[in-house]
Image (cartoon, rainbow, N blue to C red):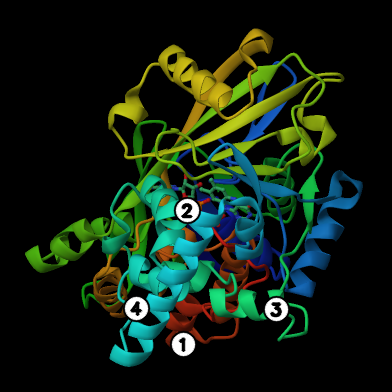
Amino acid sequence: MKGNVIILGGGACGLSAAWELSKHGYAVTVLEKESRVGGLCITNEFKGYRFDLGGHRFISKNRELVEDVRKMMGSELLTSSRKSVILLKGKVFDYPLSAKDIFLKMDMWTNTKAFLSYLVAAFSRTMFRKKDVSFEDWIVHRFGRTLYNLFFGPYTEKLWGISPKKISSDWASQRISLLNLKDVLFRLLKLKKGTPRTYAKGYYYPKKGIGQMFDIMGSEIEKMGGKIVLNAEVQGVIINPNNTAVTGVRYLENGVEKGIDCDVVISTISLTDLIKAFPEQLTANMEKHVSSLKFRAVRFLNILVDLPDISDNTWMYVSEGKYIMTRIQEPKRRSPFSAPEGKTSVMLEIPCNEGDETWSCPKEELLERCLKDLKALGLDIRDKVIDSFTTSVTHGYPVYTLDYVEHRQKLFDFLEKYENIITCGRQGTFRYIFMDIAMEMGIAAAQHLMLDKMSKRDSIHQMRSENELIEVTSVTS
Ligand SMILES: Cc1cc2nc3c(=O)[nH]c(=O)nc-3n(C[C@H](O)[C@H](O)[C@H](O)COP(=O)(O)OP(=O)(O)OC[C@H]3O[C@@H](n4cnc5c(N)ncnc54)[C@H](O)[C@@H]3O)c2cc1C
């Protein structure tokens, strides 16, 4: 066995790194604080029903990765296709939100306002060369204030819990590739041809939920000799006397303090927690950068329903602020094995902050609130509820405030001093990335180590950051 690599975190990224290294004969140990692997990609089973932490799907432009996953999963991997809608003002709109659909379904007054506000925005953007600083700027400059107020603004504020004025335009430019209004109008008037980028409908999904993919990957790693230590929460790192390398990791395993030596560390835990693992090195300035990077939590309400089906939609987006959830999902649309024969289920995504009112709301109260909201949205399932339970994540979304890039870079610069540590993954790079990119990052981290390219490891932080999306998403994932 080669090297002694410690991987912090057993989610999609950490396991992919361990998978790649194990294939090449490296001795890897994964330290995972939870009692199972998967991180954000786990699936909870309850009374014969299965719920992810927010319905996941696997899709990637990396053919090699797709092939490896298909080979690993065999017949356990299903192909599904998505159909998603937006519930807005009592109407059902296409997802991604298309301006054409809005024109056809909204009243004349709204359409006129939308058009005029677009003209104002386009004029002032050209005349005054306005810059996109915030999410609000980005949307208003491309779509006008009316569409912003109607959909993008309320949805974004609900998702992030802060004003879109305080959210970086990066989030919009990376996640939204809906055509701008001018393009849509030209197509409507047949002045422009060609197919706009369409969003990927097909995707892969394991029979037993997304968690099955990482349960299988975990078993593969162990079969190849890798070690996965569960209930092992990383507490700190040990550094050499020159302060240039990490020589070991301290962790709590089932409450017992332990330590492990290492040659290299691949960290996928949150960037801020990783920095806190270097307590002796933390200056007040560094602490300021750490405390400036925040994560948005999500609570999931999982409802078991005594009906065969609820709708044919994979996702239903709910933008209006008066409703508590951002998305409604029916897990059976991803895999028929998500619910017993003849039954279905509903999962609601409810963004919140750790410890706030929504986070600590008793389940019965939350259920009551959600059933009311669902009824108002045209989904009255109150009499059909068999049971329900909630799940939650503290690190659902990295919050892209206006200055997050600067704070994040300071933390990357700090880590750069230590030659044998790589930070990667969604939490480790503080980036809003999907599972496939987290997996690619893990594999890239492993390859940097194996190919002796540690000095170039910071390139991993920006992997796939080009504004080219696999799909056209008008909202988010
Ligand atoms: C609601 C929602 C829906 C999503 N839908 C999709 C989708 O449809 N498709 C898609 O591709 N992606 C989706 N994603 C994104 C996807 O979940 C992530 O990109 C991916 O799971 C990130 O993997 P990761 O390993 O980088 O991070 P994580 O999954 O967060 O893994 C980090 C791991 O580190 C562990 N850890 C943390 N601190 C410590 C510590 N101190 N000691 C030890 N271990 C620790 C955690 O327990 C966790 O297991 C979604 C995300 C959310 C929130």
Give the residue pinned by disc 3.
189
Q: Quadrant of the N terminus?
A: bottom right
Q: Which percent across, then down, holds residue 89?
A: 53, 40
CA gap between label 4 and label 2 equals 19 Å
Q: Considering the numbered disc 1 on the image, is that residue within a helix, a strand or a loop? A: helix
Find residue 173 and name its label: none
The residue lying at 45 percent from left, 73 percent from top is 118
**Are the residues tagged 1 and 2 within 8 Å (C-beta)?**
no
Q: Quadrant of the C terminus?
A: bottom right
Earlier along the polypeptide chain: callout 1 or callout 4? 4
Report the amino acid beneath label 2.
Answer: Phe
Q: Which percent across, then down, holds residue 170?
A: 40, 72
Q: Is residue 133 above or below residue 326?
A: below
Give the residue pinned by disc 4.
132
Whether residue 435 is visible, yes or no, is no
Report the amino acid beneath label 4.
Answer: Asp
CA gap between label 1 and label 2 equals 41 Å
Give the residue pinned by disc 2.
151
For this orientation, the residue located farthest to the front is 108
Q: Which quadrant holds residue 355?
A: top left
Q: Considering the numbered disc 4 on the image, is that residue within a helix, a strand or a loop? A: loop
Q: Is 109 displayed left or right of 283 in the figure? A: right
Earlier along the polypeptide chain: callout 4 or callout 2? 4
The one nearer the camera, 3 or 396, is 396
Q: Is 389 displayed left or right of 324 in the figure? A: right
